[in-house]
Amino acid sequence: MANFQVLHQDSSSAARLGMLHTAHGQIETPVFMPVGTGGAVKGITPYHLKETGASIILANTYHLLLRPGVETIEKLGGLHKFMAWDRPILTDSGGYQVFSLSPLTKIDDDGVEFASHVDGAKIYLNAEIATEIQNRLAVDIIMCLDQCTPFGVDAPQLEKAVERTILWAKRCKKAHNRPNQMLFAIIQGGINQELRTYCAQELVKTGFDGYAIGGLSVGEGHDEMVKTVRHTMTFLPADKPRYLMGVGTPEDIITAVMAGIDMFDCVLPTRNGRNAFAFTENGPLRLRNNTHIEDSRPIEAGCDCYCCRNFSRGTLRHFFNIGEMLGPILVSVHNLTFYQRLMAKIRQAIKANNFAERAKELIMNY
Ligand SMILES: [Zn+2]
């Protein structure tokens, strides 16, 4: 059976409903993947993570590679056991963090040498090594090593990064050596449409289990992001999953689903949760504000998350006021639940063939 099926195509937009089949279970798409940077979704037990409705999570190869190292994770029984998470996991290749967190020491067509941001140790990563590491982590979906460029980089540099991304993806495919594990390629090219076209066409020619759009949400703004996604989508096969990396706000996600994206990951629900910023259907709530001191209402009326079932805005405001760790944990639980509920509403609207209309409503209320 194919790894991915499109179950229904919305008649009012390019949005579609799909099912991803993995070794650790099925995933309904469009899907949102919480980010488990250091082997955990910050502050959230797998028990609560499941209760938020998460069907798949993302783990960062770069962070796990530095600490505790792949060998240690293998000795502890693989990444699923290590994280106590028995549902699907996707790992990124480490490329994004190498290029955004580490002082680079050397990059050429073979690979990249970087200094660990933890202790300065020199580490070498190339297509074969990135693939082997992800094979050994025994996750469900792995990503090709790509070269990420910062927003606004000049054309020759962008072109070089696209060439390397294509070259490395081909080598990743060759090196990929784990059955039951899907390999996704990443399309780069900044907001340059010609380069996006070229990169997408070359990768589709090579053939992968799925295609990701990388290098967005890095400062180009919502409109450029949407323009680039819409453009790139036209070159991707309809029968493969499409993943928009690192995006984003509820508005970004709704708009990208409308363009035909199936998968998302983003640190916003947890990062904002730790900063007392709660997502609600009617826009954000800042829980540090004094207006919440004696507010007995939950963050969001009708929300069935653990936080809203048990805690008032007043209690949460107090936790943040005194630096109690339960505050960030509870608001992260709510935000993750909010994102999963948003995706469920999106899937529901696609099923009902009125996503374009519902999308407008959702964005307007927010
Ligand atoms: Zn809630």
Image (spheres, helix red, strand yellow):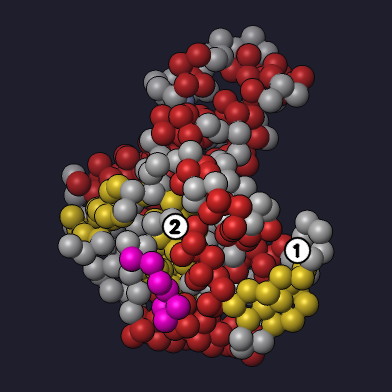
Q: Which residue is mark 1?
A: 116
**Magenta includes 151?**
no
Q: Which residue is painted at 32% across and 40% down in the image?
A: 344
In this view, the residue in front, 47 or 84, is 84
Q: Indicate the position of residue 356 as horizontal and vertical percent values.
A: 29, 52
Q: Is residue 103 left or right of residue 199?
A: right
Q: What segment carries the magenta color?
A: 173-179
Q: Is residue 121 left or right of residue 147?
A: right
Q: Indicate the position of residue 27 as horizontal and vertical percent values.
A: 31, 49
Mark 2 or mark 1, earlier in chain: 1
Which quadrant of the rendered structure holds the N terminus?
bottom left
The quarter holding residue 107 reads bottom right
Q: Identify the element where label 2 is drawn.
A: loop
| Label disc, if present, on residue 138 of the rendered structure | 2
Q: Identify the element where label 1 is drawn.
A: loop
The quarter holding residue 260 reads bottom left
For label 1, the crowd category at 10 Å Cα-Cα, with few meaning under 14, some 14 to 19 and many 20 or more, is some
The quarter holding residue 114 reads bottom right
Q: Is residue 282 above or below residue 151?
A: above
